[in-house]
Image (spheres, rainbow, N blue to C red):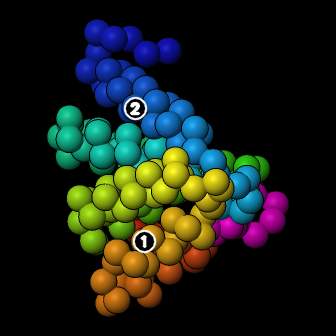
Amino acid sequence: MAYIHQEKDLDYLRYIITRSVAAQYFRQLRISRTQGYPMLISSLPGYLALQQLVAKQNGETVQKHLQKEEKLYLKGRAAESNQEPSLLQVDEESTYVSDKKGPIVFYQLAKKIGKQRLNMIISDFYRLGKEKKVTDVSDFYELLKTHIPVSRREELGKLLTNTDIGQYHFVK
């Protein structure tokens, strides 16, 4: 339960509302429900909500949020009976990947390539999804590769395809 008289609860409510609204926008797109679909309808809205949290709050609040999300991701990963899917291959059953790890991976990517660049890529994908008959995760990945410097493409591939926990340094 959140109490609107406490600032930390307001932060949480803002995050949840922003994420929910962004998710509704992404669900309006014609996205094929194939592997990677949850990354598009859950990870990207989570990243956008995280950016809103960063814009509105201090570093300590954001750090606490990242730590909480990392804990929940690790808990989900520990309960996984199969090998963890990568973000590009995540299915609707692996919500710990799309809901918890995904937004943080995109947050890291924004730190590396610039938040304006990543937000522009997301905006371009959204526009593509409204114009195209059907789109999927490969269209988003191609947009990322097209707009990211060649020197960062290998790193991008690792962020979106690697499942090794050592690859992710969520909380610094």
Percent x, y for residue 53? 29, 38
- Residue 80, by quadrant, is bottom right
- Residue 18, which numbered label? 2
Q: Nearer the viewer, residue 57 or 64?
A: 57
> What is the three-letter code of the residue carrying label 1?
Leu
Q: Residue furthest right?
A: 81
* Secondary-structure class at tag 1: helix
Q: Is residue 166 left or right of residue 85?
A: left
Q: Looking at the picture, how far across and down is residue 42, in whole percent?
A: 56, 46
Which of these two is toward me, 74 or 152? Answer: 152
The location of residue 100, given as percent across then percent down, is: 53, 50
**Spatial CA span between label 1 and label 2:** 23 Å
Residue 165 can be seen in this image: no
Look at the picture and state if 114 lies above or below 13. below
Tag 2 secondary structure: helix
Residue drawn at (50%, 15%) of the image: 1
Mark 2 neighbour density, 10 Å: few (under 14) some (14–19) many (20 or more): some
Q: Is residue 59 left or right of residue 64?
A: left
Look at 33% across and 11% down and name the residue there.
4
Q: Is residue 163 above or below residue 69?
A: below
Determine if the magenta segment contains residue 86: yes
Residue with the mark numbered 1: 144
Instruction: Residue at 51% x, 65% y: name it.
Output: 140
Q: Which mark is residue 108?
A: none
User: Position of 62 compared to 99: left or right?
Assistant: left
Q: Which circle, 1 or 2, is nearer the viewer?
A: 1
Rendered location of residue 56, percent (x, y): 20, 35
Q: Tell me the quarter of the picture where residue 151 sits.
A: bottom left
Q: Is residue 43 above or below residue 9?
A: below
Magenta residues, as a range? 78-89
> Residue at left 29%, top 15%?
6
